[in-house]
Amino acid sequence: KTTAFAKPGAALPEVIEAISHFKQAWTDFADTHEERRDGLQHAYIVTNPYSADERDKLNSVNGSEAYHVRHRHHHPILRDILYKQGLYDLLFLDLDGNCIYSVHKGIDFATNFAASGNGQWKDSGLGKAFRRALQSPDDVAVEDWAAYGPAGGKEASFLATGIRQAGTLIGVFAVELPTAAKPNDYGASGAHLQKLIDQYEENHNLLVDGNSPERRLAGGSEIAATTSQAGKSLLAAVQQSWNKLKVPLQEVVA
């Protein structure tokens, strides 16, 4: 679900309208990139009343600048898209590599990711995804999990693709994936492994429950509890094997 969203997400009318508005508001906010970065980070990060993990809750800041006006309108809409898609962050970058908007408002917000720029994280996964999206804007650039400075060195993965308005490339749409989407040594995400664990234990408990003669399954069929000695011995052996596998699986999920 999360990895398939980048291309259709960039084509959403509300996304195209939002980046168009933010591009102009970014330019009008101050005369230089440094002033824009410092001013916007101060407003949305430094003085943000919410904790670092909840900065996205801030819809409005004091000020009549066009950026703040646009933010009040577009941010709740974009945040709702983020939540519905189960993403960690959704970001807009202009063609010069400036991160002109971020739902999450990490410390990468308002910094620059152009190869020729002096942005602190231009060589990160987001910087690489941005540049690949510029080169092939109609494709989705995928940057695999790697340490990311703004995340405190924790691993992050990014998808990026071009945003077009009436056929003209106007920016780059990027998403940062949630950690639950990260594959592991078992070739599956932590969320998928947790589902596997839950499903096994639910079915196992259904079989070994001898307190009632029958249990009804979700599909409406019935199954008798296993009460014979042979059945109990078999289930005990299965449970022993499962316990050996479950520990490493839970470590991966955690």
Image (tube, rainbow, N blue to C red):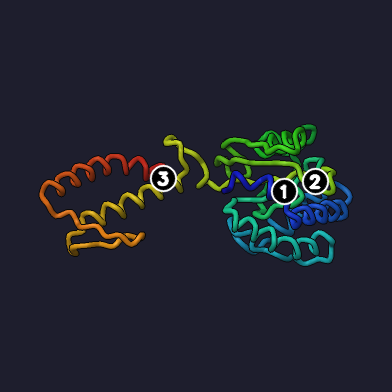
Which residue is depicted at the point 63% across and 44% down? 150
Provide residue 34's location: percent of width, then percent of height. Answer: 81, 46
Label 3 to label 2, Cα distance in Å? Answer: 38 Å
Which residue is depicted at the point 73% across and 50% down? 11
Provide residue 76's location: percent of width, then percent of height. Answer: 69, 63
Helix, strand or loop at disc 1? helix
Helix, strand or loop at disc 2? strand
Provide residue 166's location: percent of width, then percent of height. Answer: 85, 48
Q: Nearer the viewer, residue 209 or 108?
A: 209
Which residue is depicted at the point 57% across and 48% down? 1
Position of 103 with respect to 213 (left or right) is: right
Q: Say whether disc 1 or disc 2 marks the residue closer to the N-terminus.
A: 1
Q: Residue tagged by mark 2? A: 164
Q: Residue tagged by mark 1? A: 10
Provide residue 253's location: percent of width, then percent of height. Answer: 42, 45
Q: Amino acid at mark 1?
A: Ala
Helix, strand or loop at disc 3? helix
Label 1 to label 2, Cα distance in Å? Answer: 8 Å
Marks 1 and 2 in Cβ contact (< 8 Å): yes
State the mark number for residue 79.
none
State the mark number for residue 193.
3
Which residue is depicted at the point 60% across and 54% down? 85
Q: Amino acid at mark 3?
A: Leu
Indicate which label's residue lies in the foreground, 3 or 2.
2
